[in-house]
Amino acid sequence: MTDAATHTHADASAGADTPARPKLAVWKFASCDGCQLTILNCEDELLSIAEAVHIAYFPEATRAVVEGPYELSLVEGSITTPEDVERIHEIRAQSGTLVTIGACATAGGIQALRNWADVDEFRSIVYAHPEYLSTLDTSTPIASHVDVDYELRGCPVDKGQLVEVLAAFLNGRKPRIPTYSVCVECKLKGNVCVPVAHGTPCLGPVTQAGCGALCPTYGRGCYGCFGPQDSANTDSLTRQLAELGMSNDDIVRVYRTFNAGAPEFEAASNKVAAGGAS
Amino acid sequence: MDDIRILAPSDLDTLIAELRERGFRVVGPTLRDETIVTGDIRSASDLPRGIGDIQEAATYRTRQRDDDAYFGFAAPAQSTKPVFFPSEEVVWRGKRDHDQGGHFTAERDTANASPVALLGVRSCDLRAVQIHDQVLAHRQFKDVHYTARRDGTLVIAVACGVPAATCFCASMGTGPRPAATDPQTGQPSYDLLLTEVIDGDTHHFVAEVGTDAGRDIADAVAASKGTAKDQAQAIDITNAAAASQTRAIDRNTVHDVLRASAESSRWEDVANRCLGCTNCTMVCPTCFCTTMSDVSDLAGENAERHRVWDSCFSANFSYIHGGPTRESLKARYRQWITHKLSSWEDQFGMLGCVGCGRCITWCPAGIDITEEAAALGRMSGLGSTASAAST
């Protein structure tokens, strides 16, 4: 791996006595670019990141392209076209470690709503020439197509977690990314529980931590941006959401947002759509 | 005879100022986000005067009382647990030392904080502090961070006159009136014990002196002398509070009930409701489990070891090579309640539950530990028939 890095032509800083920095590539599939922007939003850490890795391919930030292979690839977005399927295999082939970032890449994103719809039908309504369009019937996560080394959740990903994954990769250690619920983060911060104290419906109990309990910290219920926690009991939460006054339609909608395609949320929404939880 | 004093409501400000003057960080109940929480108290205006609470399984609401009671509510959202045992703390920091061949030099993080005065701590929470003392400070290896924060604590307890529907301290023998001494150490439980008396037009606090430090504080605020009659009135208030509690756990049988219930079909039932969210453990004043988490910066020059609250309800809590030993929510709930109400006794010589009712109130699914214990009691045939909660 280091061989490839030392032979790159554009890496001016890779002098004789400086150890080669691993090459980083950032790829985009069907997505809003928000997770890539999170990298650029790492203002305080950006210089350290650029010192620690060689940013070799990152069109959102620079037109300069250094050819692969790449030690680390960060992949944003979901697979929605036949071209995507080919491209992700090419990326996998030239990546050492492949990390998917964000709800699109890890669960298919909000565009996974198409998985419940008739794509031909809305293609014919939206586009004047639907025949020019080549698209798949589904939006699927990267891991449905290639092996993924690590999945970083969130819509968008959390800046601190992203830096943590990079630091872990660079130091050859396990990232400190908890898979427990958002409730833990609320309690660690001393937040008041919004469903219990205010009657506000909240997906926190079934959602993975990572955002720092952003919405409950401001008195709002959790929207599930980080996908299902490692032991999500959606049946129980569905009953609780109904108890707090949500209609079945609304419950289906909260499960089907940014992580609609995450298996636990998908199953929960299907169950409610079919007539409620047991 | 006991040393009884009387404080007027206006003395609270003097009391708080006196404590702050003496270098204490005063911690007590305060209103935030429509909830009574435990926080820093700078003056009596930080106390939730005239605010009461309504607690039920999965429900917490504050309400306006029709009097000016300063302590007219039951258990705040969180106990004093984070004061001595913070949710996350740095244990040590390491720095790569290039003069030493790149080895790390570690620097232990020492807690260096003001002593704490607990103002208005309830009997249940005070008992929980004593349990934490036993677990964290009185065993072979002391938790140095806990001990550093806990040293020099001044306790101005307020006996609870208004339990919530979720409270069951009376059945656990932990309240509403605190025991004068810690049953494990024999040390005084409080420096001062206040009982708030609101009777017609009179509003005052009966203060019972527990230690010389408490007496000193009472003298400093020039509290007037009280009588045995005042003390009797204070005891009547907590007796009535105990009698008003509707939930209960039979503490005499529960240890054996849990022991006999390892294969109970009840676990499946509770697992259907359990969200695995960890809230019960996070609000439990005696839960003390933590995980160690190591972080390093991008360059690998600096590293830190953090100790963070953890919960037996998360999958990774029991992760060992190959996977978690408690894969199902059924196994995790069983582990938690069995520890609280049974194996804690084998481990520490006491039960791990103080009857504060927080795990009932703050469980978003409304799982009720008294109801589960009662159900297991019935199903095992070992429980008391007098157990309160019915299913």
Image (cartoon, coloured by chain):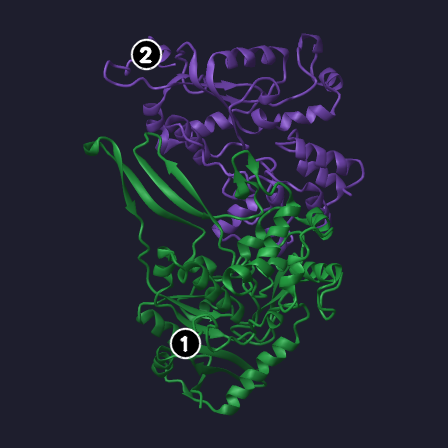
Chain colours: A purple, B green
Q: Is residue B368 left or right of residue B42?
A: right
Give the crowd class for mark 1: few <14, some 14-19, many >=20 residues within 10 Å: many
Please, which chain is the residue tagged with disc 1 on? B
Q: Quadrant of residue B138?
A: bottom left
Query: Would you say B149 lies left or right of A189 here?
Result: left
Residue placed furthest toward the right? A275
Q: Is residue A251 above or below residue B120?
A: above
Mark 1: amino acid: Asp
Q: As drawn, which residue projects farthest toward the left?
A: B99
Q: Position of residue A74 (x, y in %)?
A: 48, 22
Q: Amino acid at mark 2?
A: Thr
The tag on residue B191 is 1
Q: Secondary structure at mark 2?
A: helix
Q: Quadrant of residue A24?
A: top left
* Residue A61 image position (x, y, % from top left): 42, 20
Q: Are marks 2 and 1 on the same chain?
A: no
Q: Is residue B216 above or below residue A98?
A: below
The residue carrying pointer 2 sits among few (fewer than 14), some (14 to 19) or many (20 or more) residues within 10 Å by Cα, namely: some
Q: Position of residue B328 (x, y in %)?
A: 64, 42
The part of the image, by quadrant, that contains residue B148 is bottom left
Real-space Cα separation, disc 2 to disc 1, in angstroms: 69 Å
| Residue under label 2 | A6
* In the image, residue B319 above or below residue B361: above
| The N terminus of chain B: image quadrant | bottom left
